[in-house]
Amino acid sequence: MSFIHLYPTFAAAIIVEGAPVLWPILAVLGIVVLFFRTLRRRGQQVSAFELGVLYVGLVTSYAVVPFLGYVIGGLSFSPVSDFRLFQAQPLPTELAPIFWYYVLYLGAFCMGYLRVRQNINANVPELVPCPRRLILVLIASLFAIKIVFLFVNLVYGLGQSDSYEESYLMYRGLPLVLQQVLNHLNGMIFTLEILIMLLLVRNFHQYKRWILGWVCFQIASLFVTGVGSRTELLVILMAFGVSYHYWVRPIKMRVALIVGTVGLLLFMSLGIVRGLRELNTDNGINPLGYANEFEIVLGNAYDISHIRTGGEAKDIFPQFYLSDFFNLVPQQFLPFKKIDLAYWYVNGFYPDFAEGGGGLAFGAIPESMLGLGWVDAIWRGALVGVVFAWLYRRVLNGKQSIWSVGFYTWVLVFSYQCFRGTTFLLVPRAFYQFLSVVVWAKILLCILSIFQTDNNGRQIVPQAVSG
């Protein structure tokens, strides 16, 4: 039943029938208000590109968006919603405990973040000079990785994928070692793009046409190559926003909120476009009722709550607590099978869906439910808050290299994975996809410095690479 049909009784349904889920959402919004009021009472400037501020917005979106879809749909889920929630049609009383997990997680994050953040006087990270050849090294490395993917596609006869499912199935048949290498190389692409954008915007007036051309090219490739380029576009736009805010002109909070809201609506519209062929127009259109990742994480939590109650997760408890850290070690060097919660969940409970290349991410809330419940939600949120606050203080404390600012930007861009994926998902990715780029770039710079000569053609003694 659509929102249009329910409009006369919409307010009554919210207040009476939807009250169990309304209260935790109001609590989430209350925490957000208190968070910003605390920052302002300290006399601190609030920036959308502050790690904690962005993460609070992300967690809030993961709570509010599926709630709105559920309410606008008449406290029900439509056929194009998450398939588990549509089949179960949970009552507000069944969803309320899950939404209270969001409250505990967000509240713990805000307390941990504000405790460690304290007062910060600096507003802009001070960047030390970088080697002139660095940007050329990064660009060359980016093109080299792109060529590797092109070569693999040609050798193994792989075509262009039009969806995440097709991309997964396309590479699943490759040898395990090659799959591992390509997975890390794909992440290194994002790191290289972030670092390149930072260096370009650092000299904005000199490279602004190159930046505009890059963004336009990425947008154009979105229509040519499809789904795969969306993440790259997000990465370069976020990196541009961060570096422009710090080194060119501060972006006001309200401007960032408007741009972020528009971006979220555009992201949501992609789900509507994909579901048009399945749409029953007699039921009306609920723009928030399509299976987006916000709703999928809620569906994971709802499903995991039943799986945990049924005792079907005993095989991974408590060893899953260390699963992200074991991902630092390649599977070939471990005497046991590593646990990937997203893989364990979709392959163990929805094998047909997984066989078709489908994935369901996971989420910090479902992860908490697999463990000690609300205790996990609190310590996970608090720990992420402490780490994010420390990183934010670190990047604004004294002179920084391009690597430290780049790492902060990298964490900012992919911080959503700590809530959408698993709490420590960024730990192995930081090692393989960021640190590897730093080491590789420094090695190349050292090699190039060997062949560096002065104006008289004499060789210059190699110096240590800055940062």
Image: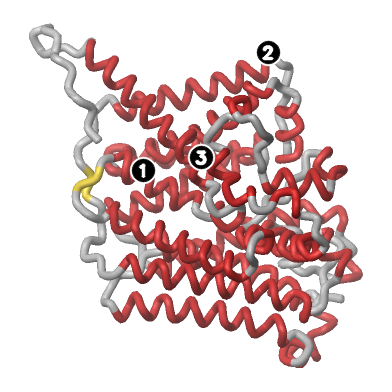
As drawn, the label of residue 406 is 1
The residue to which callout 3 is attached is 429
Residue beneath disc 2: 155
Mark 1 is on which residue type? Gly
Q: Quadrant of the C terminus?
A: top left
Left or right: where 249 falls relative to 419? left
Rendered image coloring scheme = secondary structure
| Residue 308 placement: quadrant | bottom right
Give the amino acid type for the residue marked by disc 3 in the picture.
Answer: Arg
Q: State how many labels appear.
A: 3
Relative to 111, residue 279 above or below: above
Residue 168: x and y in percent read 72, 35
Q: Position of residue 371 (x, y in %)?
A: 65, 60
Q: Residues within 10 Å of mark 2 (few under 14, many from 20)?
A: few
Q: Is residue 230 left or right of residue 450?
A: right
Q: Earlier in the sequence, mark 1 or mark 3?
A: 1
User: What residue do we see at 47% from left, 67% from top?
Assistant: 109
Determine whether, in the image, residue 78 is placed left or right of residue 444: right
Give the percent coordinates (x, y) of residue 82: 79, 60
Q: Amino acid at mark 2?
A: Val
